[in-house]
């Protein structure tokens, strides 16, 4: 597990379920037109759900070289550009973009999420659109936190750990936090999705959890990380098979308009 992020092939396997469906729904809220910026573009799935005739120029940014290499081959076109970069580190022309997409990405920037929103605000033209989705707190479906914390405590006792214990629920937004972060935007449309996810095998289970599991992966010394994270998934899967752990996907989808100065 040299790369704690999913490989492009693994990403496509997991995103074919809820993640890709959520992206398709998000981009159905309004036509994405003109110059588009895609933050955390992954394998470029945004381009599957946008009309190429409406796109003047597309820029996709992702921190993973593997993802960008995959996307560059899958979506090669004269008006399509992919960049390997941390979004907060890259230099882009202010107020250039008619629309930006930040799908299933913002929560990974916590605690720098406000810096991401502020940078997006500066890059989108007044009246331009922001298509945003992010991990959201649980409401109806039972949450995952208690089991995550229990299993993580067991694994941290078994293997040398570094840093403070963190679980993925620490990266979820709630209504107040997301509204406060979006002060430069008007919410045009919102949609809340929360549902349980079912798995047919341990590999399917592990594929789904690998992204969120990266917050656990970083808590162990390099020499035993693979061993520790595999035990972490195995223990979670035992709870899942026994009916004690209900895995759910909870996200909020927002269409936003950049306010005029």
Image: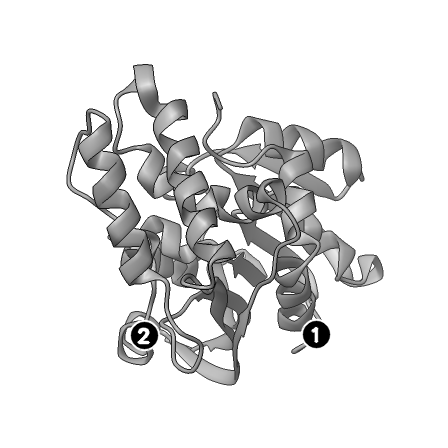
Residue 27 in view of the camera: yes
Q: Work out which quarter of the rendered image holds the C terminus and state it.
A: bottom left
Question: Which residue is painted at 57% across and 34% down in the image?
Answer: 83
**For residue 9, above or below residue 129:** above
- Which image quadrant is residue 175 in? bottom left
Secondary-structure class at tag 1: loop
Question: Which residue is painted at 65% across and 78% down in the image?
Answer: 29
Q: Earlier in the sequence, mark 1 or mark 2?
A: 1
* 214 relative position to 247: left or right: left
Residue lying farthest left? 164
> Whole-Å distance between the Cαs marked 1 and 2?
23 Å
Question: Which residue is painted at 25% across and 33% down in the image?
Answer: 219
Residue 88 at x, y percent in the picture: 36, 43
Instruction: Quickly name the residue at label 2.
Output: 174
For mark 2, does the 10 Å Cα neighbourhood hold few (<14), some (14 to 19), or many (20 or more) residues? few
Instruction: Quickly name the residue at label 1.
Output: 28
Residue 131 at x, y percent in the picture: 55, 68
Residue 76 in view of the camera: no
Residue lying farthest right? 53
């Amino acid at each position: 597990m040299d790369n704690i992020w999913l490989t492009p092939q693994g990403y496509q396997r997991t995103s074919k379920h809820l993640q890709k469906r959520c992206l398709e729904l998000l981009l159905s809220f309004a036509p994405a037109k003109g110059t588009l910026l895609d933050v955390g573009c992954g394998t470029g799935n945004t381009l599957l759900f946008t009309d190429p005739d409406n796109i003047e120029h597309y820029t996709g940014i992702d921190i993973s070289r593997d993802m960008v290499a995959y996307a560059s081959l899958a979506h090669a076109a004269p008006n399509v550009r992919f960049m390997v970069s941390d979004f907060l580190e890259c230099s882009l022309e202010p107020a250039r973009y008619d629309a930006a997409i930040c799908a299933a990405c913002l929560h990974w920037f916590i605690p720098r999420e406000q810096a991401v929103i502020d940078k997006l605000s500066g890059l989108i033209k007044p009246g331009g659109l922001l298509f945003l989705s992010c991990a959201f707190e649980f409401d109806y479906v039972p949450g995952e936190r208690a089991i995550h914390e229990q299993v993580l405590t067991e694994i941290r006792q078994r293997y040398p750990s570094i840093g403070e214990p963190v679980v993925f629920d620490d990266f979820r937004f709630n209504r107040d936090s997301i509204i406060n972060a979006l002060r430069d935007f008007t919410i045009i449309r919102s949609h809340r999705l929360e549902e349980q996810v079912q798995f047919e095998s341990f590999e399917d289970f592990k594929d789904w959890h690998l992204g969120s599991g990266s917050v656990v992966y970083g808590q162990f010394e390099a020499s035993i990380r693979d061993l520790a994270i595999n035990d972490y998934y195995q223990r979670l899967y035992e709870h899942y098979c026994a009916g004690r752990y209900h895995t759910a996907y909870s996200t909020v989808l927002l269409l936003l308009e950049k306010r005029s100065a």
